[in-house]
């Protein structure tokens, strides 16, 4: 009898230990699977970024923002001459945006204006293609969340969720073969869709197609030509270095800072562009006027917050949560 009791006690002691070990091993398995999933998702986004920048393609997509739907065509060429890109609106007010290695050109047929900005902008389209995905992984969780079909292409779905409340999340649908982005959805902290892009057509371009692409719009002498130079290297030298940001949300940095002279007055507007590689916020500093924003404002995915410092108004605006623009505006100080 005593021996049976000892055996029973031994079994009762062994069972919890075995169960705990099983749970521990199961947790390790799931952790390993999650890490592997995240690494594959990051690799997919890196492939997407390279494809959107390095491949030549053309297509049509719809862009939804602020309850408005816009249809656009895009031609993107990468060759020995560099990068060239053309965006044409297909509904609403006619306009065309062209980019090459040196200029960003906007054509407005209704007002018969051509604006040439020698800013060497990286992209003129709303399509997302990050530079440093590894850095983003410190502040966003990447995961493969399924498969789908978009514009007759088989796609991998990647979920990108922020690790804090200072950023929006995103889902992207990537072509299984090329990695090209076919759809993206930007969502807020409550999971509500704030912005969406979806291709209806997308094809790779061949060499003959690339030769037929011209970055010179068809305009006549009746168009007014407006030239500007907002190259960052030139304008950043004009920035008032006494304007500082005392505190930034983790992962954000000041990408550039410059100021521009307002055409209607002798006053200057200073602008700081803050980014984490995915989200971007502009902080504007200007003399206070009757139209200056005070407090918060929002329109679709864009939030803004304005506050006053002496005779100046500081306004932060960007596609980020309201708490982010508020923090950046209130962190802006003038140091004598």
Image (cartoon, helix red, strand yellow):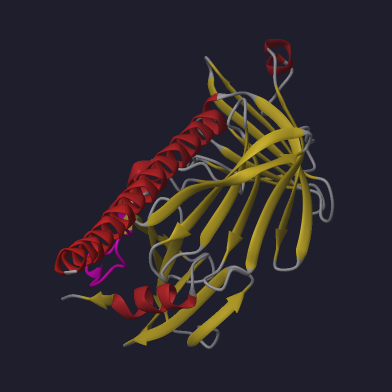
In the rendered image, the residue lying farthest to the right is 91
Which quadrant, please, contains the C terminus?
A: bottom left
Q: Nearer the viewer, residue 316 or 98?
A: 316
* Residue 327 in which image quadrant: bottom left
Residue 94, image x and y in percent?
81, 49
Residue 315 seen by the camera: no
* Residue 203 in which image quadrant: top right
Residue 12 left/right relative to 72: left
Residue 112, image x and y in percent?
78, 48
Residue 234 left/right relative to 80: left
In the rendered image, the residue lying farthest to the front is 1
Instruction: Please report the bounds of the magenta region as a residue range.
Output: 238-252
Residue 169 left/right relative to 96: left
Which quadrant, please, contains the N terminus?
A: bottom left
- 57 w.r.t. 261: above or below: above
Residue at the image position 24 percent from the left and 61 percent from the top: 11
- 82 w.r.t. 277: above or below: above
- 51 w.r.t. 307: above or below: above
Q: Nearer the viewer, residue 244 or 137?
A: 137
Residue at the image position 30 percent from the left and 75 percent from the top: 332
Residue 214 seen by the camera: yes
Residue 115, image x and y in percent?
63, 46
Residue 211, image x and y in percent?
69, 14
Q: How many marks?
A: 0
Residue 100 left/right relative to 214: left
SS assignment for the magenta stretch, majority: loop
Magenta stretch encompasses residue 47: no
């Amino acid at each position: 009898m005593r021996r049976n009791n000892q055996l029973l006690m031994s079994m009762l002691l062994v069972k919890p230990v075995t169960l705990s070990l099983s749970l521990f091993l199961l947790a390790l398995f799931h952790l390993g699977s999650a890490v592997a999933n995240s690494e594959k998702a990051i690799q997919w986004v890196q492939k997407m970024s390279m494809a959107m920048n390095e491949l030549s393609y053309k297509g049509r997509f719809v862009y939804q923002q602020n309850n408005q739907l816009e249809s656009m065509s895009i031609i993107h060429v990468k060759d020995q001459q560099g990068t060239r890109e053309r965006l044409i609106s297909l509904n609403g007010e006619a306009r065309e945006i062209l980019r090459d290695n040196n200029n960003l050109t906007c054509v407005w047929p209704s007002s018969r204006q051509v604006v040439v900005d020698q800013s060497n902008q990286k992209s003129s389209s709303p399509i997302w293609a990050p530079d440093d995905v590894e850095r983003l992984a410190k502040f966003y969780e990447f995961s493969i969340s399924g498969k789908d079909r978009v514009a007759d292409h088989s796609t991998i779905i990647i979920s990108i969720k922020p690790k804090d409340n200072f950023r929006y999340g995103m889902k992207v649908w990537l072509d299984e073969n090329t990695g090209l982005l076919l759809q993206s959805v930007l969502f807020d902290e409550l999971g509500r869709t704030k912005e969406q892009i979806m291709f209806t057509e997308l094809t790779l371009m061949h060499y003959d197609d690339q030769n037929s692409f011209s970055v010179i719009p068809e305009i006549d002498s009746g168009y007014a030509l407006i030239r500007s130079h907002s190259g960052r290297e030139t304008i950043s030298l004009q920035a008032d270095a006494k304007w500082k940001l005392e505190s930034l949300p983790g992962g954000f940095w000041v990408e550039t800072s410059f100021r521009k002279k307002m055409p209607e007055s002798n006053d200057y507007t200073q602008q700081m562009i803050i980014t984490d590689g995915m989200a971007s916020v502009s902080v504007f500093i200007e003399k206070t006027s009757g139209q200056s924003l005070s407090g918060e404002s929002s329109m679709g995915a864009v939030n803004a917050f304005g506050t006053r410092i002496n005779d100046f108004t500081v306004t932060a605006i960007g596609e980020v949560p309201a708490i982010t623009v508020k923090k950046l505006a209130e962190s802006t100080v003038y140091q004598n």
